[in-house]
Image (cartoon, rainbow, N blue to C red):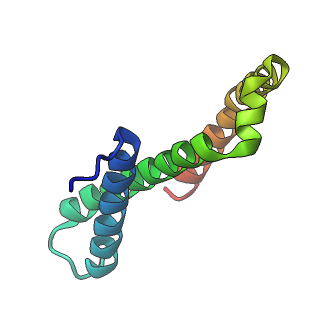
Amino acid sequence: MYIRSSTWRKLFAAGGLLFFIGLVVVIVLDPQTTHYPVLRAVLALFMVVGFILLITGNFVLLYDRNIFTQRIIRSPAGFFWMRVVTMVLWLGVLPFVCLWVYHQLHHFR
């Protein structure tokens, strides 16, 4: 019998596959001895994208089943506070993280 998978489970599986393929290739292709630096960079990007998809899929799959989040979603006040926390993270933390990454990139040049 064929087991139906949701879109999020497929996204989770694709993210895991991309992450582990990228991780293995980045470990195997040593930057000092490889003749394919572009391939290594592309597969490192696969690893990063796979990690993001893996974390997103994991969050969504656990979010649907968690009793605590279901209780917060059912109450209007809880949903409002989830929006407030999301906005604080997007407007408060994300710009500082972007500035820190920019500083680190220019520090190593």
Q: Which residue is more in the foreground, 75 or 37? A: 75
Q: Which residue is more in the foreground, 104 or 98? A: 98
Q: In the image as oriented, which residue stretches furthest toward the right?
A: 77
- Looking at the image, residue 97 sits to the left or right of residue 76; the answer is left
Q: How many marks?
A: 0
- Looking at the image, residue 45 sits to the left or right of residue 89; the answer is left
Height in image: 95 above or below 77?
below
Point 28% across, 52% down: residue: 3
Q: Which residue is more in the foreground, 3 or 88? A: 3
- Looking at the image, residue 99 sits to the left or right of residue 47; the answer is right
Residue 73 position in % (x across, y down) = 72, 27
Residue 77 position in % (x across, y down) = 84, 19
Q: In the image as oriented, which residue stretches furthest toward the front?
A: 1
Point 67% across, 46% down: residue: 66
Residue 97 position in % (x across, y down) = 65, 42
Residue 59 position in % (x across, y down) = 56, 47
Height in image: 72 above or below 31?
above
Residue 85 quadrant: top right
Height in image: 32 above or below 49?
below
Height in image: 91 above or below 19?
above
Residue 75 quadrant: top right
Res 92 seen here: no
Residue 68 quadrant: top right
**Which part of the image, by quadrant, shows the N terminus?**
bottom left
Point 31% across, 53% down: residue: 14
Res 76 seen here: yes
